Amino acid sequence: MKLIDTIIKYQEEGLKHSFLDFGIHGTLFDPSSQIEEIPKAFDLGVSSFKMFMTYAKLKWMTDDYHLTAAMDLIAECGGLAMVHAENGLVTDYLEDRSLRRGEDQKKVFLMTRPDYLEAEAIFRSVTIAAITNCPLYIVHLSTARGCNPVKEARAEGQVVYVETCPQYLTMTDNILQKLGPLAKIGPPLRTELDRLAIWRAIQEGMVDVVASDHAPKIKKRDDPFFEAPYGSPQTETLLTVTYDEGVNTGKITLCKLVQLLAENPAKIFGFYPKKGAIQRGSDADLIIFDPNQVHTIRPQTQHSGASYTLYEDRKCLGMPILTMQRGKIIMEQGEIKAKPGNGKFVSTKMTTSRVDRR
């Protein structure tokens, strides 16, 4: 499907069904035919474009030639390139070798996607971004080793933003071994050393955004692991889990949490100060959060299309009790008050707003 057709389709679906204001990233699943459409996407309010450096077997992977071509054109148009950074061809070889050996794919899932492959892909992406002078956004950083090429690129003055997700801040491969297909995500859940390293990266200002990578796939724990799709529901637990694991343990302050979840992404994608701020002229997008409320996460309390959550039975201290958008109540005490179709499409654009890395 053409990129422009897909953007129009999702804009129409969002305006019809979304409870929330939304922007759109253009994802290049077929870069050889979609790259030429990038300038037209800007006319539709889309200026950020995601590419996969992995998933070659799924035919999602963008090779280096087309990654360079895309970044060159994105930079020329004044946009932002986004990459899922893992070396896809080496991953596929390791997986194929493991399959030939008859190994349990759940047990070797992490070993066939080692941290070196994330670090290598990040280095390659920042190198191509430097050559094309293209601003770069690394999605869902998951390893300690992946931090090194980002530090080097920033030291040389490159514009490189980094995102991680709550699953990499709270979970390890042990959860995958327990939940099987439900916890099959990409990049994979890593080691405890990686988990702690990502928290240090946040504390040191290297990570700009904590995002959900929400992908609520329909699957069950007893599904065949190898055939199970990637992804898990994450949006609804994003704030609660990150607050509980970060603020309650003293890893970050409440102000830092707000920067990671709201202010910085609004600045990076050009929504600020309409979004991501509480001030005159901004949208009244507000959350009332009770830091003293204890609750246990259950699938039954979630509003996702998936029938599970990776955080089932996790007891958290603190939860949102009311959310508002543009001054109107969206949810109160776990009950949705708004109607679908109230969301507005918001154009993304690169701005000169600086993210706060303190």
Image (tube, rainbow, N blue to C red):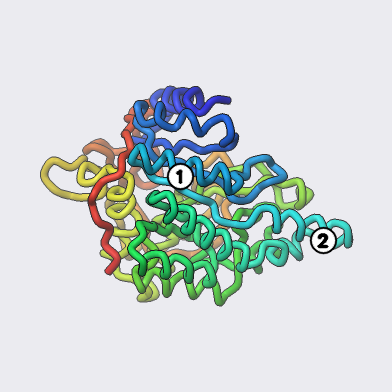
Image coordinates for residue 348, horizontal then vertical, percent? 33, 38
Quadrant location of the N terminus? Answer: top right
In which quarter of the view is residue 251 placed? bottom left
Check disc 2 and report its element: helix, strand or loop.
Answer: helix
Q: Cα distance, mark 2 to mark 1?
A: 34 Å
Which residue sits at x=36%, y=47%?
333
Tell me what residue is drawn at x 63 percent, y 41 percent: 60
Task: Count the numbered circles shown.
Answer: 2
Quadrant where the C terminus sits is bottom left
- Taking the view exactly as shown, the residue that stands out farthest to the left is 280
Q: Is residue 296 visible?
A: no
Question: Which residue is tagged 2?
Answer: 98
Give the percent coordinates (x, y) of residue 147.
47, 69
Task: State the residue lying farthest toward the front.
Answer: 131
Q: Is residue 270 left or right of residue 160?
A: left
Query: Residue at the location (66% across, 68% down)?
Result: 174
Q: Earlier in the sequence, mark 2 or mark 1?
A: 1
> What x and y, as percent, mark residue 284?
21, 42
Which class describes the residues within 10 Å of circle 2: few (<14), some (14-19), or many (20+)?
some
Of residues 346 and 292, which is closer to you in this image?
346
Disc 2 + disc 1, Cβ < 8 Å:
no
Amino acid type at image mark 2: Ser
Q: Residue 170, how many percent across, how many down? A: 51, 66
Amino acid marked by disc 1: Met
Disc 1 designates what residue?
Answer: 71
Q: Nearer the viewer, residue 256 or 121?
A: 121
